[in-house]
Image (cartoon, coloured by chain):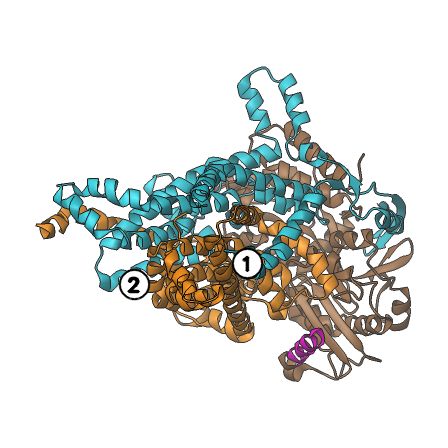
Chain colours: A cyan, B orange, C brown
């Protein structure tokens, strides 16, 4: 296809992406290299309904003058990336010096905010993604085997966890898993432990979040696999039968290879989405026990009264780099495919 | 012979049916529970003393005199004018789906048919665009949007959602077009069509399954979005999800929580129709090879 | 297009109000009133009264949203500002002051503020920057009947409180001293536990008290026995372990004088004594407006004030300190970390944030 035709076709798509995604990303990267000007403070008397106090406040006029000179703030290079809220190399060095054993060292490093979030994010990504793929595959096999008449409703109900706004996760499910809710009470009976509470310990909170993640994303894998199953070539399947392949062997040697590209696609999307896990943490009020990289960004942007843009920008860039590393195998494969095509 | 090999042995059948039943319960139970509970009062549905109150409706009978009440629906739809958000959501989702797909089919087709190296880099860039957490992007939009005076309006939100969704749409449609044989449009071009005519006459008629599937995912993104809509829309332009969240408010007022529950149930209903209606297309769309990495 | 959308919104506001739109709100001159507010009942009451001021010459648009804090700085920094008035608390006023986005209100108060009490005026170096209309703080909620039956006095210190809950647990009145899920509770969740008679003592926001003592609520018997007192003190400090907050409004700098005058008048109408004449509205908060007689829900706030509780500081770095503590104390509370370690982490978090924001070098 000539360059000109190509451009004509892709231009509208490219323009919206450049304006509303690439441009903000560029500004995020730029922002991450700067920190706020040194604040000029003055002492003022604040009076309100509860009396007067002498407090310090920012001299907004003096700051305005500073900002008009250098709107982005003070250049900080990669300082924000290395500070103790992010990669924290300096603090890791200190921890290295003061700890005796490896276990102790790892313990303390994992307690740094960025690494604490990273470890949960990775655990979530690598537990939820394969479970989603496997569960989705078996649901697809099962649904494929049921008679046509009830297939429609079954598909609808199977899709529910994915198509309903995550808000419901925070509202209804959160109450259901409470130790007084229907699921929480049921679990207490099943495990014969009347004090069992999913919200009380970090481990159980993690497990709850994983289960929610799998439940929420399994339908996505299911739809893709189910659709793929419709296209498994009939003649291959029949010749496998003629060759006397058992049911399992047919799944193993015909269905699975056929569905493999679909599994790659699901893995690609799921790795990316799970690495950005955020909503369930807020929805299940799990901040005390589990934080993710996206949660750190949220907390920098919305946690206090004024957003910490540089910090959020640095975490965002690191998250993006993390996603790229995760997707590297897929990217390399796409590159090879592409070269073959070209 | 084929028949006997196809008929499942009983234990396997039982296992497969049992598995699906368990999955259906896991998938649908929270919603059935919610639907049932939306006809109760808050102290029943969210009862701390005894969860069985949600089934028996003890407090509902005490407060309203009947075991079921439509108070949540009445509050949400009439008092809080939930229908306005429904209209806004309809406008947003419909526009997002149509615009995303229009831009996405053109772009995806071009990416699939051009052999130059830059198409690879465009696809990679799209992936990186998709990796950026939305909450970061949204915070970046605020100041410029206020300065341009476009903050708060539906068209702004629509175009932002289209942009955020474009990488996924491009990827999916690009792989889908790869599975449509090149000869189809190229022979049309040999017959004297321009590239665009070939696209219109030869490709469009066969692309619907892939487009419908991609459309479903665009639809879900726009329908469920909270991060973008909650920050970029004014109160009167709110879509359903931020509206439901506003029923909860910063601090919940007693009874208003049930508006949220009723609204959530109301929001599921159109999806039921949609899924039943498009079920066949969704499935055939993916079958046609929409997503072969 | 902007204009068209705005005017439809104003009409919508008019229709929404229907017959209640009274001639009471007479604004001199014309202008546009654009309100940005948080979304909870007491503020809803104020905002909907201000919306009654919509007329042929005055348009009123409102945006009540939980995200108000995140959009206010961007919204007020444009010229003209997207909102003429922002409803703020002492915490959320600070970012607006830092950026110099608020308008001095002295002239407007002199001209239209005859109904205001002096205690409502929030001044920075003598200049009025905001008008407060309600107060809030955390307070102790207790079940008067249970404490009385078991011969326990209302706790004044945390030590008393722990002893009291221990004796209630010993007497078999309550199951435990504290639920193991305590880190996940917010003020919304406490209510059903309270109504289920599983809690006898709790600390919580005064703005939520109305629901706990609402005798038309789900558990009238319990509500009738619910009383509030000042927050307990800790150690030998003898002052309630809480801070005092106010909610009020501040106005945008970048708006025309006509809009400012119209907005201020609309807010004055909203905050006139009729606001609290309705007993239901009066019960929602500890109002600071003229004509308010304290309701049971506000007793705790005033008890805190009397006992010497301090106002929440309006220092610009307070928010960061708050976040740093909030993010790091959970591990100590769960017994996974020593207090020293948790505080060390909080210091590191705060240092990072404050350095980035330019407060520390």
Percent position (x, y) of residue B56? 36, 62
Q: Chain of mark 2?
A: A
Q: Quadrant of the C terminus of chain C?
A: top right
Instruction: Say if mark 1 contacts mark 2, CB within 8 Å.
Output: no
Report whether mark 1 lies on the same chain as mark 2: yes
Dot 1 crowding, Cα within 10 Å, few <14, some 14–19, many 20+: many
Q: Chain of mark 1?
A: A
Does C8 appear in magenta? Answer: yes
Secondary element at image label 2: helix
Percent position (x, y) of residue C30? 81, 79
Percent position (x, y) of residue C359? 80, 40
Does B125 appear in magenta? Answer: no
Boundaries of the magenta span: C1-14
Tell which of C108 and A114 is nearer to you: A114
Residue A192 in sight from this viewpoint = yes
Left or right, B263 with respect to C155, comes to left
Q: Quadrant of the N terminus of chain C?
A: bottom right
Instruction: Give the mark nearest the N terminus, 1 or 2.
Output: 1
Secondary element at image label 1: helix
User: Residue at the location (31% across, 51% down)?
Assistant: B23
Residue C228 in sight from this viewpoint = no
Instruction: Give the labeled residue for mark 1.
Output: A10
Q: CA distance from mark 1 to mark 2?
A: 37 Å
Q: Which mark is residue B4?
A: none
Left or right, C41 with respect to A198, comes to right
Instruction: Give the labeled residue for mark 2.
Output: A152
Tell which of B157 and C243 is nearer to you: B157
């Amino acid at each position: 296809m000539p360059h000109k035709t190509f451009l004509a076709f892709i231009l509208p798509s490219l323009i919206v992406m450049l304006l509303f995604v690439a441009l903000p990303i560029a500004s995020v990267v730029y922002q991450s290299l700067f920190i706020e000007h040194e604040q000029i403070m003055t002492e003022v008397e604040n009076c309100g309904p509860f009396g007067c106090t002498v407090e310090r406040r920012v001299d907004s006029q003096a700051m305005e003058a500073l900002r008009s000179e250098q709107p982005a703030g003070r250049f900080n290079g990669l300082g924000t990336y290395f500070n103790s809220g992010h990669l924290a190399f300096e603090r890791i060095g200190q921890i290295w010096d003061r700890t005796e054993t490896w276990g102790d060292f790892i313990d303390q490093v994992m307690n740094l905010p960025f690494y604490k979030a990273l470890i949960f994010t990775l655990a979530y990504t690598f537990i939820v993604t394969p479970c989603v793929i496997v569960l989705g595959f078996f649901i697809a096999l099962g649904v494929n085997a049921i008679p046509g008449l009830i297939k429609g409703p079954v598909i609808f109900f199977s899709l529910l966890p994915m198509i309903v706004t995550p808000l419901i996760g925070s509202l209804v499910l959160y109450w259901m898993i409470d130790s007084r809710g229907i699921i929480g009470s049921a679990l207490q009976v099943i495990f014969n432990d009347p004090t069992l509470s999913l919200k009380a310990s970090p481990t159980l909170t993690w497990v709850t979040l994983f289960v929610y993640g799998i439940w929420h994303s399994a339908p996505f894998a299911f739809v893709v696999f189910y659709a793929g199953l419709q296209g498994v070539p009939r003649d291959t399947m029949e010749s496998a039968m003629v060759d006397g392949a058992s049911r399992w062997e047919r799944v193993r040697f015909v269905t699975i290879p056929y569905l493999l590209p679909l599994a790659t696609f699901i893995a690609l999307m799921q790795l990316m989405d799970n690495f950005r896990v955020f909503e369930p943490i807020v929805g299940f009020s799990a901040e005390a026990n589990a934080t993710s990289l996206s949660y750190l960004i949220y907390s920098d942007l919305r946690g206090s009264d004024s957003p910490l843009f540089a910090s959020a920008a640095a975490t965002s860039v690191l998250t993006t780099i993390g996603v790229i590393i995760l997707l590297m195998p897929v990217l390399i494969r796409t590159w090879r495919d592409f070269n073959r095509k070209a | 012979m084929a028949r006997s090999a196809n008929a499942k042995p009983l234990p396997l059948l039982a296992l497969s049916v049992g598995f699906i039943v368990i999955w259906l319960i896991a998938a649908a139970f929270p919603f059935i529970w919610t639907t049932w509970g939306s006809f109760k009062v808050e102290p029943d549905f969210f009862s701390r003393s005894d969860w069985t109150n949600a089934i028996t409706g003890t407090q509902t009978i005490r407060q309203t005199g009947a075991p079921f009440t439509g108070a949540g629906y009445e509050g949400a739809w009439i008092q809080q004018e939930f229908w306005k958000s429904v209209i806004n959501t309809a406008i947003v989702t419909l526009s997002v789906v149509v615009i995303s797909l229009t831009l996405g089919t053109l772009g995806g087709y071009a990416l699939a048919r051009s052999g130059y190296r830059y198409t690879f880099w465009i696809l990679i860039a799209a992936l990186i665009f998709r990796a950026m957490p939305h909450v970061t992007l949204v915070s970046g939009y605020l100041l410029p949007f206020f300065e341009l005076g476009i903050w708060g309006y539906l068209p702004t939100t629509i175009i932002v959602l289209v942009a955020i969704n474009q990488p996924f749409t491009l990827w999916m449609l690009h792989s889908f077009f790869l599975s449509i044989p090149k000869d189809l449009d190229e022979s049309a071009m040999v017959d004297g069509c321009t590239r665009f005519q070939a696209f219109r006459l030869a490709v469009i008629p066969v692309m619907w399954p892939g487009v419908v599937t991609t459309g479903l995912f665009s639809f879900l993104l726009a329908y469920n979005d909270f991060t973008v809509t909650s920050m970029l829309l004014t109160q009167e332009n709110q879509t359903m999800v931020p509206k439901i969240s506003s029923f909860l408010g910063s601090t919940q007022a007693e009874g208003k929580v049930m508006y949220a529950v009723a609204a959530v149930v109301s929001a599921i209903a159109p999806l039921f129709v949609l899924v039943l209606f498009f079920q066949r297309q969704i499935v055939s769309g993916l079958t046609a090879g929409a997503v072969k990495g | 297009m902007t204009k068209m959308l705005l005017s439809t919104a104003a009409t919508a506001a008019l229709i929404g109000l229907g017959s209640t739109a009274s001639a009471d709100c007479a604004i001199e001159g014309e202008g546009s009133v654009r309100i940005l507010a948080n979304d909870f009942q007491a503020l809803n009451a104020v905002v909907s009264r201000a919306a009654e001021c919509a007329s042929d010459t005055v348009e009123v648009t409102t945006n009540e949203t939980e995200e108000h804090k995140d959009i206010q700085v961007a919204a007020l920094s444009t010229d003209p500002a997207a909102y003429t008035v922002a409803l703020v608390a002492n915490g959320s006023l600070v970012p607006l002051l830092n950026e110099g986005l608020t308008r001095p209100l002295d002239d407007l108060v002199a001209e239209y503020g005859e109904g205001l009490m002096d205690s409502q005026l929030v001044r920075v170096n003598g200049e009025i920057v905001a008008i407060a209309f309600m107060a809030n703080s955390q307070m102790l909620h207790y079940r008067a009947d249970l404490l009385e039956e078991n011969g326990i006095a209302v706790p004044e210190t945390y030590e008393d409180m722990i002893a009291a809950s221990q004796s209630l647990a010993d007497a078999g009145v309550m199951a435990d001293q504290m639920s193991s899920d305590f880190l996940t509770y917010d003020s919304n969740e406490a209510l059903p536990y309270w109504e289920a008679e599983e809690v006898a003592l709790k600390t919580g926001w005064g703005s939520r008290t109305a629901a706990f003592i609402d005798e038309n609520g789900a558990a009238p018997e319990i509500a009738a026995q619910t009383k509030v007192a000042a927050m307990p003190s800790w150690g030998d400090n003898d002052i309630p372990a809480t801070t005092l907050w106010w909610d009020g409004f501040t106005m945008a700098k970048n708006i025309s004088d006509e809009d400012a005058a119209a907005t201020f008048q609309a807010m004055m109408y909203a905050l006139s004594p009729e606001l609290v004449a309705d007993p239901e509205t009066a019960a929602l908060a500890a109002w600071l407006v003229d004509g308010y007689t304290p309701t049971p829900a506000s007793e705790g706030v005033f008890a805190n004030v009397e006992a010497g509780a301090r106002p929440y500081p309006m220092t610009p770095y307070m928010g960061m300190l708050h976040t740093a503590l909030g993010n790091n104390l959970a591990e100590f509370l769960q017994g996974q970390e020593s207090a020293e370690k948790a505080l060390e982490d909080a210091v590191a978090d705060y240092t990072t944030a404050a350095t980035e924001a330019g407060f520390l070098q």
